[in-house]
Amino acid sequence: MANQELELTIGWLYPTLMSTYGDRGNVIVIERRAQWRGYSVRIQALDQNATAEDIKSVDVIVGGGAQDRQQEIVMRDLQGAKADAMREKLDSGTPGVFTCGSPQLLGHYYEPGLGKRIEGLGILDMVSVHPGDDVKRCIGNLVIEVTASRLAKELKEILGGATPYLVGFENHGGRTRVNTQGGKVEVLGKVIYGLGNNGEDGTEGAFYQNAIATYSHGPLLPKNPFVADWLIQTALRLKYQQPFALKPLEDKLAMKARETMFNRLKVDLATPAVGK
C-alpha cells in the first residue's frame, strides 16, 4: 500500500480553549512529519461541536494547556458518551501527547488555588492540586530522562540506541502525584533539570498505554521530534495492523538546538543532577 493511500487523523483536543502555551505546535509537527513521508493527514477538532463518533475516528490525540476557567468549561463538555469515547480510545492504546493542563483532565481531579475541585476522567491514576497563589509556580526549562519502560525502549530504537531525553519548558501552579502502585500508569521520566510533577519526588509526567502526559510544553515536539515520529509510527501500526518503520528525516538543526540547550543549562547527561 502506497503512503499516499494511508491517512492519519489527528484529534486536536479543544483547540480554542486549550492552546494557552502555543501547543498547537505539537499538532503542526505531527502533521508535517507525516506529510513529509507521504502520508495524508486530516485534523479533527475535538471541541464542543464534536461528537463521540468524532473522538472514535481519530488515530492520535493532542491536548494542550488551559487556564482554570477554560478547564472547567472543557470538563463540563467532556461528559457522557464523549467521556466514554475518550476513555475507550486511550484504554485501547490510541497514542497521544497531553501537555500542561490536559493531563490534569485525564487524572482523577484537579484542585485549583481558588474555586471548586474539577473532576477528571480518571484515565490516569493521579491527582493534581494547586497549593495557592502564595506558593511559587514551577517555571523554567525542563530536562527529563524517559524512564517509562516500553516507551524508553521504543524511543531508544528510533534514536539508534541513544538514551531518550526530553527538553521542554514548564509553567504550572498545580502539583501532580502519580500512583504507580497499581501498575496502570508509570511516571514518564525522572527530572534531570527543573521541577517536574511536584518539585519534590524527582518525577515528571505520566505514561499509560500509548498516552504521554507531561508538564513540558513550549511546545514539546519541535524540541523532541523523535517523539512525534513515535506517535506517528504507533498510530499507523495500530490503525493498519502492520509494522511501520518511518523513513528518517533531516533533523540536524533540531538536534543541534537540543545540544545547545543542554550546554546552556550545563546539564551533563552522563552524571545528571536533579534541580536547578
Image: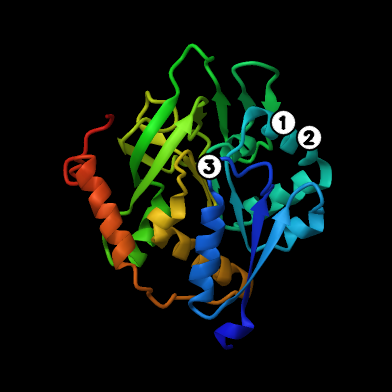
Q: Is residue 149 above or below residue 157?
A: above
Q: Is residue 266 above or below residue 7?
A: above
Residue at (24% x, 46% y) in the render:
262
The residue nearer to you, when weighing 265 against 204, is 265
Q: CA distance from mark 3 to mark 2?
A: 22 Å
Looking at numbered disc 2 in the image, what kind of residue is underneath it?
Arg
Instruction: Give the quadrant of residue 114.
Output: top right
Residue 218, percent across and down? 45, 45
Q: Which residue is mark 2?
A: 76
Looking at numbered disc 1 in the image, what kind of residue is underneath it?
Glu
Q: In the structure shown, which secondary structural element does the residue marked by tag 3 occupy?
A: loop
Instruction: Give the quadrant of residue 191.
Output: top left
Q: Which residue is mark 1?
A: 72
Q: In the structure shown, which secondary structural element does the residue marked by tag 1 occupy?
A: helix
Residue at (75% x, 34% y) in the render:
73
Q: Quadrant of the C terminus?
A: top left
Which callout, 3 or 2, points to the residue nearer the camera? 3
Q: State left or right for residue 64 relative to residue 221.
A: right
Q: CA distance from mark 3 to mark 1?
A: 18 Å
Q: Which residue is mark 3?
A: 21
Q: Is residue 219 above or below residue 195?
A: below
Q: In the structure shown, which secondary structural element does the residue marked by tag 2 occupy?
A: helix
Labelled pair 3, 2 in contact (Cβ < 8 Å): no
Disc 3 or 2, which lies upstream in sequence?
A: 3
Disc 3 or 1, which lies upstream in sequence?
A: 3
Residue at (47% x, 38% y) in the render:
215
Mark number displayed over residue 47? none
